[in-house]
Image (cartoon, rainbow, N blue to C red):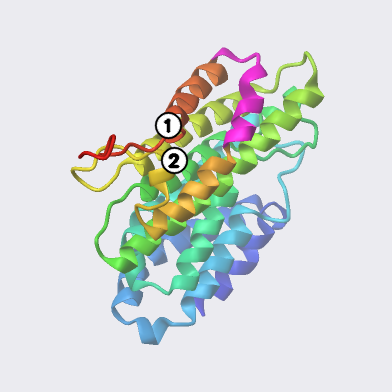
Amino acid sequence: MVFQTFRLPLSMKYSCPSPSTWALAINSLLSVLNVGLTVARKHESAFHSMWSELAQTLEEFLFSKHPSPPTLSVEDFQRDEAVDCKVILMVRDDILPFAVSMPKDFVKRIMQLLNKGSIHTTSSDSFIDTDSSKKLREEFAKTCFETLLQFSFVSKTNSEEGAITKMAVLSLLNRCQDVVRKHVDDERLSGKCPLPRPRLAEMASVLKAITTLVRSLKKAPPGNGSATLFEFYEISNLRRVYGYQVIQLYPALVDCTTSPSPNVCRALKEALHEYKDLLAPPTSSTQNGTA
């Protein structure tokens, strides 16, 4: 298989003998996928084994076990990050819109990949290391997150397409939970030292996503107005799953109210206002026994 040929240099990445090896391999892979994905979708049975290989190849490249060397300049790091973003854009444009014609396991792995990529990572374990914060894959995380967000609010009537939306929303919710809880823990540990700017920007973007998500999920079927928390669980099985996880986020959001960041507090305020509607008592069309 062609992916097995690409897989070795892509997984080695910065450990390749020549720095240009993995760059040549990923550009060649993207060229192959530009033509090959269309063919594979039309002849699914002939390319059944391809999808798992592709998912594994993408994951090992984007999350290589061979990190960038400490001598790599910030400019070179950003150049390499742009290549990673290019791969995610390929996923956004050439894979997810056609997910209904691809194996479900493959699509699930792609969603997991986006979820993993949407969380900022750095080469240092220190959350106040300003040097390492320069090498956060900020644009890469943003691209992954925006792709998840884009496919979380696609309204489809087809059940299979709806399943894609469900996977995207659940991945997005899991990602939001991880970021919010980690942010709260790290702010407590940092004391008076502010978290790196990319971390604060990440938190603000996650809070905005939560606001958008809650607004979307609160919408009842046409003509029924907005849903309260008590009505929220009765709209559909899908929203019942989402609703539970959304409510589970509330205590962590309350813990964020002590954040010293104005941008975080502003985004948090908007998110909590949306919860206000969810926590309202159920409305009733019958009062004192009359309609």
Q: Residue at x 28, y 78 (%)?
A: 42
Q: Earlier in the sequence, mark 1 or mark 2?
A: 2
List the residue tagged with mark 2: 229
Q: Is residue 41 visible?
A: yes
- The percent position of residue 13, horizontal first and vertical second, equals 66, 55
Q: Residue at x 64, y 54 (%)?
A: 63
For residue 260, side relative to residue 138 (left or right): right
* Magenta highlight on residue 277: no
Stretch in magenta: 250-262
Residue 247 quadrant = top right
* Magenta highlight on residue 261: yes
Residue 273 quadrant = top left
Q: Is residue 35 visible?
A: no
Q: Amino acid at mark 1?
A: Ala
- The percent position of residue 245, horizontal first and vertical second, equals 54, 47
For residue 130, side relative to residue 118 (left or right): right
Q: Secondary structure at mark 1?
A: loop
Residue 283 drawn above or below residue 117: above
- The percent position of residue 269, horizontal first and vertical second, equals 50, 20
Marks 1 and 2 close (CB-CB < 8 Å): yes
Q: What is the chief secondary structure element of the magenta stretch?
A: helix
For residue 149, side relative to residue 114 (left or right): left
Q: Residues within 10 Å of mark 1 (few under 14, many from 20)?
A: few
Q: Secondary structure at mark 2?
A: helix
List the residue tagged with mark 1: 280
Q: Residue at x 60, y 42 (%)?
A: 177
- The percent position of residue 176, horizontal first and vertical second, equals 56, 41
Q: Nearer the viewer, residue 214 or 175?
A: 214
Residue 195 quadrant = top right
Q: Amino acid at mark 2?
A: Leu
